[in-house]
Amino acid sequence: MSVLVFADSSEGKFKKSAFEVVSYGKKVAEQLGTAFTVVTINASEVSELYTYGAEKVLRVSNDQLRTFNAKGYTSVIQQAAAAVNASVVVLDSSINVLHVAPMLAVAMQAGYASNVVALPSEIAPFTIKRKAFSNKGFSNTTMNTENKIIGVAKNSYGVHENPVTGTSESFDVILSESDFGVTSEKVEKASGKVTIADADTVVSAGRGLKGPENWGMIEELADVLGAATACSKPVSDLGWRPHGEHVGQTGKPVASNLYIAIGISGAIQHLAGINASKVKVVINTDPEAPFFKAADYGIVGDAFEVVPALIDKLKAFKAA
Amino acid sequence: MKILVCISHVPDTTSKINFTENDTQFDTNGVQYVINPYDEFSLTRAMWFKEKQGASITVVNVGNATTEPTLRKALAIGADAAIRVNALATDGLFVAKQLAEVVKNGGYDLVLTGRESIDYNGGMVPGMLASLLDYNFVNGCVGIEVTGTTVSLTREIDGGNETHAATLPMVVAGQKGIVEESDLRIPNMRGIMMARKKPLTVLEPLDIANATSVQSYEKPAPKGAVKLIEADNIDVLIDLLHNEAKVI
């Protein structure tokens, strides 16, 4: 028995969520008193993982997996789990890994708990806390199977340093033609922009901005904060902003450290998608906007005055 | 083309979330149930296949008899037949295994689902179903075209989209984008009348143990009141975000 973590990388580089799941997996291995291994696919430099407790890293290098392939990734993790006799596999909640996790559960005949927000509260029976009801509740779930897959919700457990002297070795995998039944034809990706999934801060704006021509200040505020830009559903439906920026229940989920909502009233469908964010700031002219009830900090005021002032003050703060 | 659309019966987004029986059960009191929004996008895309390419649509749900109005609504929107597997859906792998049995017996070419349900948000049934059947699988689908057995799909990724090619049979988990919100259909009176006459078959479940079980539920800790800052006092906000919230 041992614990295996898959540390996902993009273009060779790890994201924060990789460090979060390594931090988490290390602790679970300690709770269970078992060995701990991390597997990577086409990562260029794995030593960063040692900072978070990765004692042993398996490096998989495979040209067929330069672009993400769900079945191929599933097969790699399954082979790594078999090699280290892992019965617990810890994964993150990125779009790609959410694609892989349920397939891996079937391949390993494992129970799968997604949206996990804390370390196991008990290990016999194995009990973990999960988000449910679009962040309006939690469930304490026991996992009844020998093999277990834990999907850690983004930005829930956090990144914890736990430096170890790690070693890494190359790990050979065998992929078959049937792993490539779904082939990637084309990837279209905005380059050089912070994505909503990766951002520590998200600056989001709604219909209160009155028109797409007014988004300059939103982008500038996001630039100053190193943030991703997002928008409410009506704004994407009106075509003011691209669909990929829509956050909320039927759009992208947000679990950032800081979420700034400008001119968004805070409909329940919007809140359902963003309420996993840790700190929420609301700027709205309407003091009765429902978003103020869900926010940590609020300014009742006109975005066209508040946002430029906020940009100036933040620039001064950053320069200081 | 034979299409199966998997439908979750979920509390409407505006529902108050409460728990009963010592926090071991979801409180259904006063809760309105709807077709899971993600599933509704996929059902609507299935309707386009039916109307433009002559597909047949069966909808399926794993649930007890209280979910039947949701299946009837799907029939009223335009599905041809419904199946209910008579079991409580409390674990993803359990549900996927029940659905896999339905797919095997029905010989469906394309299984459409939503990306996740808005109640338990597990996001696991579609991928598990595909793996159990050894079908191709695409998650988070925002566009699908089928020509013969060739499928062209677009999937949402971080910061963009990815286009895929695959062949039937396959499982596709859709989300907004596979159709737009404005494409969703409200059943009309004729649809509702016709739905009453369409077949709704009840199947008994396979006897399988749950891989996971919920022991108890919790509500999030109550949130403190918002701190309001004067619009002409932005330094205070920056100070709070830096020193109190520690997020900048």
Image: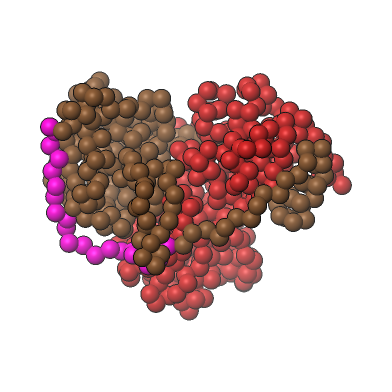
Chain colours: A red, B brown
Rendered location of residue B25, percent (x, y): 35, 61
Instruction: Give A28 or B177, whichever is nearer the viewer.
Output: B177
Please report the bounds of the magenta region as a residue range: B197-217
Residue at image coords 22%, 43% = B68
Instruction: Give A133 or A243, whichever is nearer the viewer.
Output: A133
Rendered location of residue B197, percent (x, y): 12, 32
Q: Is residue B22 left or right of residue A242?
A: left
Q: Is residue B203 left or right of residue B126?
A: left
Vertical order, A107 against A193 (above or below): below
Vertical order, B158 against B145 (above or below): below
Vertical order, A217 against A18 (above or below): above
Task: Give yes or no for residue B214 being in the magenta stretch.
Answer: yes
Residue at image coords 82%, 44% = B235
Rendered location of residue B54, percent (x, y): 19, 24
Q: Is residue B114 left or right of residue B195?
A: right
Residue at image coords 22%, 29% = B192
